[in-house]
Image (spheres, rainbow, N blue to C red):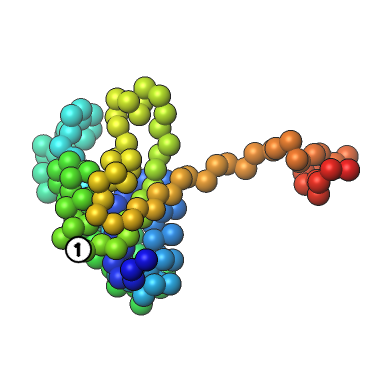
Amino acid sequence: MSPVRTILHPTDLSENSEYAFRLACSLARDYGARLIVAHVVEPPIYVSYGELEKILQHPLGYTLELEAKLAKHRALDPKIPMEHHLLEGNAVDEILNLAEETQSDLIVMATHGRKGLSRLLMGSVAEKIVRKAPCPVLTVKIPAPNRVTSSESTSTAGEKTLSSGPT
C-alpha cells in the first residue's frame, strides 16, 4: 500500500459520522497525514417550513450555521493538519471531485446501514463512493447498542455476567 498522506472525511454532521471522524483523526495522527473534513450541501428536494424560512430570511445565515458546525470538527491532537470544506451540489460527485483535487490517499466515512425501500429510494452515498473512488475507502458502521446475547446470563443479584464458554 502506498503511504497515506491525505485522508478525506466526508461528513453529514450527524452523530453517526462522529465515529468515522474519530477514526479518521486516529489514522491521520498515526500516519502523520493531513485530514480534510468536508460537508456537502445538496440542493433541497423537500424543504421543511422552518428550513425554508431560515433560507429565505438569511440566505447566508444557513451557510454560516453549517460552516460553524463543520468548524467544530477538530482533532484532539493539534499536530494533525486539518482543512474544512463546505461544498454545494451532488454529494457523491462533490466528494469524488474533492478526493481527486486533494489527491486523497484514503476516504473514511460513516455508513447509515439503510436497508430495503429506504436504501432503494435514497440510495447510498457511501456505496457509490466505494464503487467510484480513486483511492481506498474505509466505511465505518455505527456501533450497535449493548445487547444481551445468548452467551450472557443473569446472576442471582441481577448483574449481567459473561459466560466463559461451555460448562
**Residue at position x 32%, y 25% in the image:** 120
Q: Quadrant of the C terminus?
A: top right
Q: Nearer the viewer, residue 98 or 55?
A: 98
**Residue at position x 18%, y 29% in the image:** 45
Q: From this view, report whether residue 29 is shown above or below residue 112.
A: below
> As drawn, which residue projects farthest toward the bottom?
79
Q: Is residue 43 visible?
A: yes
Q: Quadrant of residue 62?
A: top left
Give the left or right position of residue 39, taking residue 59 as reference: right
Give the x, y percent position of residue 140: 43, 49
Give the left or right position of residue 98, taking residue 151 as reference: left
> As drawn, which residue projects farthest toward the top?
117
**Residue at position x 29%, y 25% in the image:** 121
Q: Quadrant of residue 52?
A: top left
Give the x, y percent position of residue 55: 14, 39
Q: Amino acid at mark 1?
A: Thr
Give the x, y percent position of residue 151: 75, 40
Q: Quadrant of residue 38?
A: bottom left
- Does dot 1 land on a helix, a strand or a loop? loop
Q: From this view, report whether residue 146 is shown above or below residue 25.
A: above
The residue that disc 1 covers is 102
Give the x, y percent position of residue 32: 36, 75
Q: Is residue 49 visible?
A: no
Q: Nearer the viewer, residue 139 or 37?
A: 139
